């Protein structure tokens, strides 16, 4: 470890709680400055998801006593992961290690060295942007410390580049004729209805009611597809109710609704941070006028507001199997990947297990096909 560099491991919620100002201050100066690395987001996630099988393992990298890096980690079965992530469940995106640009190598080399010295044998770091400078440093210092390094599971996150100065009309002109026509058609349909209100949650006095409506409408949207939706998980819902309070207080929450004659027919849950708007979740009343697409309208209204606010991006976030509609808005996308670092022995076991799981999955698919 470089002279003057030290690593402290923070393992208590009390210590985590005390880090808010210092954490967000370093994040604001970091190339990894996204809402999903804010102290508020990760602290609420930990409060919601902590259980006896998980332990905090936040790494604070200091140089001559001054904080220069944060490894926002926890341990599960001796595997180190990012706070805010849970294997097999997308909760947080654009994850990374927090440092100022010039401190990348010192911070990551210290974290890898400390990991080895502590006897930790594996790290699974999910949803790191593929253009992050952390990836080069993680690979370099993993190899220096005789660890195996693997990147996998590249995911795409469609986003719209927003220029300044720019108008919503100019934005529409840049879209394809098909989506322009759809937006104008939906606007005409909405204008024919009476009692239409488009609004956002404006204060804490509205949040309980509005959050409950978001959850209800999200469930309605997915019930029509034969599933219950993400908010049916009580831990997921508790996390988001808690973090929405923080995001509202900080001015980052954009919880929007379209209602007709007092009935909410659609909701959108966006986060506006550091010049970017992230679309997180949505919901709609599946029984209200099935010829309408209120979700399309809410996206168009949110994009217009993002342009008016001078945002540089409207990010649809990772596109899953049912999210083809995201790519109708844009051809641009960010890439995110997962990084697995382990001792050579653990890596061999991981690859064998991964291979076995893939073979079992193929076998099940073949058997399923035979039955049908």
Image (spheres, rainbow, N blue to C red):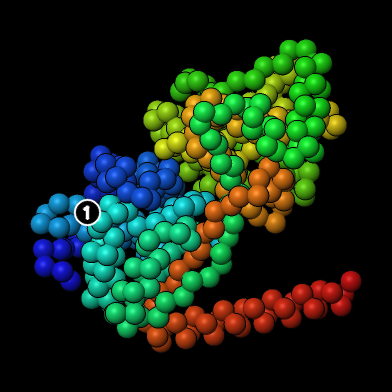
Direction from residue 143 to residue 62 in the image, left or right? left
In the drawing, does residue 269 fall left or right of residue 292?
left
Q: Residue 350's spot in the image, x, y percent?
A: 49, 80
Residue at 48% x, 43% y: name it: 239
Q: Quadrant of the C terminus?
A: bottom right
Rendering quarter of residue 41: top left
Q: Quadrant of the N terminus?
A: bottom left
Residue at 59% from the left image edge and 26% from the top image edge: 167
Near-viewer residue (286 or 175): 175
Q: Is residue 15 above or below residue 355?
A: above
- Residue at 85% of width from left, 31% of height from top? 291
Q: Is residue 234 visible?
A: no
Near-viewer residue (83 or 168): 168
Crowding at mark 1 (Cα within 10 Å: few <14, some 14-19, many 20+): many
The secondary structure type at the circle numbered 1 is strand
Q: Residue furthest right?
A: 372
Find residue 337 and report its horizontal and vertical position in percent: 51, 63
Seen from this angle, which residue lies furthest top?
194
Vertical relation: 144 (above or below) 76: below
From the image, tell me which residue sits under label 1. 68
User: Tag count in the figure?
Assistant: 1
Q: Residue 12: percent from the left, percent from the top?
A: 27, 53
Q: Is residue 192 at all visible to an observer of this figure?
A: yes
Residue at (53% x, 35% y) in the render: 163
| Residue in the foreground of this view, choosing between 325 and 211 | 325
On the image, the x and y values in percent for residue 146 come to: 32, 83
Q: Quadrant of residue 106?
A: bottom left
Q: Quadrant of residue 121?
A: bottom left
Q: Is residue 148 above or below residue 77?
A: below
């Amino acid at each position: 470890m470089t002279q003057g560099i030290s690593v402290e491991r923070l393992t208590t919620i009390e210590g985590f709680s005390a880090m808010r100002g210092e954490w967000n201050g370093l994040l604001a100066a970091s190339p990894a400055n996204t809402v999903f690395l804010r102290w508020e987001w990760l602290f609420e996630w930990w409060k919601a998801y902590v259980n006896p099988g998980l332990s905090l393992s936040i790494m604070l990298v200091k140089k001559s006593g001054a904080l220069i890096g944060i490894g926002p980690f926890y341990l599960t079965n001796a595997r180190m992961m990012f706070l805010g992530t849970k294997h097999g469940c997308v909760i947080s995106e654009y994850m990374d290690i927090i440092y100022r640009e010039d401190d990348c190598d010192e911070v990551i080399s210290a974290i890898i060295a400390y990991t080895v010295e502590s006897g930790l044998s594996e790290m699974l770091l999910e949803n790191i942007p593929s253009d992050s400078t952390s990836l080069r440093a993680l690979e370099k210092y993993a190899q220096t410390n005789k660890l195996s390094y693997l990147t996998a599971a590249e995911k795409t996150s469609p986003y719209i580049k927003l220029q300044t100065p720019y108008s919503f009309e100019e934005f529409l002109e840049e879209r394809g004729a098909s989506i322009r026509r759809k937006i104008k058609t939906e606007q005409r349909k909405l204008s024919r209805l009476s009692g239409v209100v488009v609004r956002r949650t404006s204060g804490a006095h509205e949040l309980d009611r509005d959050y409950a409506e978001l959850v209800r409408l999200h469930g309605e949207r997915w019930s029509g597809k034969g599933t219950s939706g993400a908010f049916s998980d009580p831990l997921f819902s508790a996390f988001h109710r808690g973090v929405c309070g923080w995001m509202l207080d900080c001015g980052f929450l954009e919880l929007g609704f379209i209602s007709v004659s007092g009935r909410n027919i659609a909701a959108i849950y966006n986060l506006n941070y550091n010049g970017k708007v992230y679309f997180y979740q949505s919901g709609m009343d599946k029984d209200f006028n099935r010829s309408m697409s209120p979700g399309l309208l809410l996206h168009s209204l949110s994009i217009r507001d993002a342009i008016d606010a001078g945002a540089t991006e409207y990010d649809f976030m990772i596109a899953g199997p049912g999210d083809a509609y995201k790519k109708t808005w844009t051809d641009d996308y960010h890439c995110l990947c997962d990084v697995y670092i382990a001792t050579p022995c653990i890596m061999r076991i991981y690859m064998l297990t991964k291979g076995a799981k893939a073979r079992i999955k193929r076998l099940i698919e073949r058997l399923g096909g035979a039955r049908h």
